[in-house]
Amino acid sequence: MRIGIVCYPTFGGSGVVATELGMALALKGHEIHFITYQPPVRLDLISSGIHFHQVQIEEYSLFHHQPYELALSSKMVQVAEKYDLELLHVHYAIPHAYAAYMAKKMLQDKGKEIKVVTTLHGTDITLVGSHPNYKSAVEFSINNSDVVTTVSHNLKEETYHLFEISKEIEVVYNFIELEKYEMNSIGGKDCQRGNIANDDEFILTHISNYRPVKRAQDVVKIFAKVLAHKPVKLILVGEGPDMAAVKQLARALGVYDHIVFIGNSTEVDKVLCYSDVFLLPSKSESFGLAALEAMAARTPVISTNTGGLPEVNVHGVTGFLSEVEAVEDMAQNTLKLIESREKLAEFKENSFARAKQFSIDRVLPKYEAIYNSLVKTT
Ligand code: GMT
């Protein structure tokens, strides 16, 4: 099938899911066209079946804000016509679902039919999409997509709760390519733990975009509490608006020198392979792809119980869940995990076993079934 994939090309989870979905579909013989403003960070452009089309926005002194939706929908039309696309799969509703609707209408005007699948990822619904400034347009684009999917049951419920939705939403969980993490698992030859910590130290890790919704300062507070009892290192991967506040807090709590700051990375698997515990104290999380990536690398998760996180992280099995802001509880749970090597090893295996349930081999056929229900191939 000839499919256009529209996503944010940055380090966010929705872009990662869209990119890995596209690459997996290409491996199965589909022709995949990424349409976005720069090559997605995890995209292997030299793979066969993968094409990239850059959305370019013209500068004009009158524009206070660049009209990205206009450029994006025009690009979708151009690519759909040139490559005879059968379907557009857009990730993150704003503004992709809206632009896809416009592209579909423009193509109809030219006598070409195209189907639109919209995958909702989280903040496009819970944080930004439901804001009165965007709500009508988001609701309209969801209701006018041919198929709408969410990445968790919680996000499906939230979407029905926050919008007037007239159609059935399908849940298709986020997925993981296990082999990528298995290669680096405990004892694997690429896992260079010794560069980061001594044998008697435990490694805690957090990966995010450091937006306020991630509550990254709570990571530092949890870490400081754990460090008071056990030798631990904290690895912080990623960048974002709260990073300066995180560093300031780390200095104030006297733990700065125990933290390794990695910045944005396309090699999170290499960091996760030597991590002992993953911390995710988010205020809201539709799924928590970073938690699943950690679990695939046999790293148990200390998280909040918000949104879709309980659908991924199983309390007392793959880690522990706490109320949002319950820093003391999350620190105690971290200590519970690292108090005995046997217990940690058991949770590590449980995490991997749980991650297998989200293997790409299980999830990819669900998207393919959706595509096949919309596009009749001869
Ligand atoms: O977490 C973010 O702010 C990034 C955002 C995105 O769209 O890139 O992540 C959302 O989508 C991910 C992939 O489906 C989910 O795993 C995240 O839980 C979700 N983030 C939130 O709901 C806050």
Image (cartoon, rainbow, N blue to C red):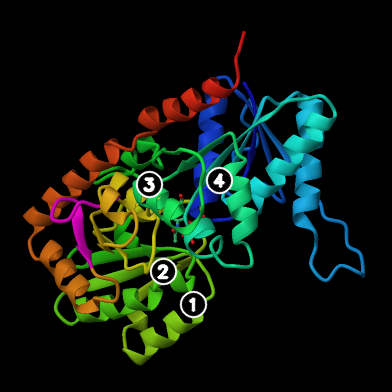
Q: Disc 3 versus disc 2: distance between alpha carbons?
A: 18 Å
- Disc with the residue nearer the chain's start (4 vs 2): 4
Span colored in magenta: 312-322
Few, some or many C-alpha atoms within 10 Å of disc 1 (few <14, some 14-19, many ≥20)? some
Q: Nearer the viewer, residue 192 or 75?
A: 75
The answer to whether residue 315 is magenta is yes
**Residue linked to disc 1:** 242
Tell me if the residue at label 3 has its CB under 8 Å from ligand 1: yes
Q: Nearer the viewer, residue 130 or 233?
A: 130
Mark 3 belongs to which amino acid?
Answer: Ser
**Residue linked to disc 3:** 152
**Residue linked to disc 4:** 42
Q: Describe the element under mark 2 as helix, strand or loop.
A: helix
The answer to whether residue 41 is magenta is no
Q: Position of residue 350 (x, y in %)?
A: 17, 45
The extreme top residue here reads: 378
Q: Which mark is residue 27?
A: none
Q: Position of residue 254 (x, y in %)?
A: 32, 89
Q: Which mark is residue 214?
A: 2
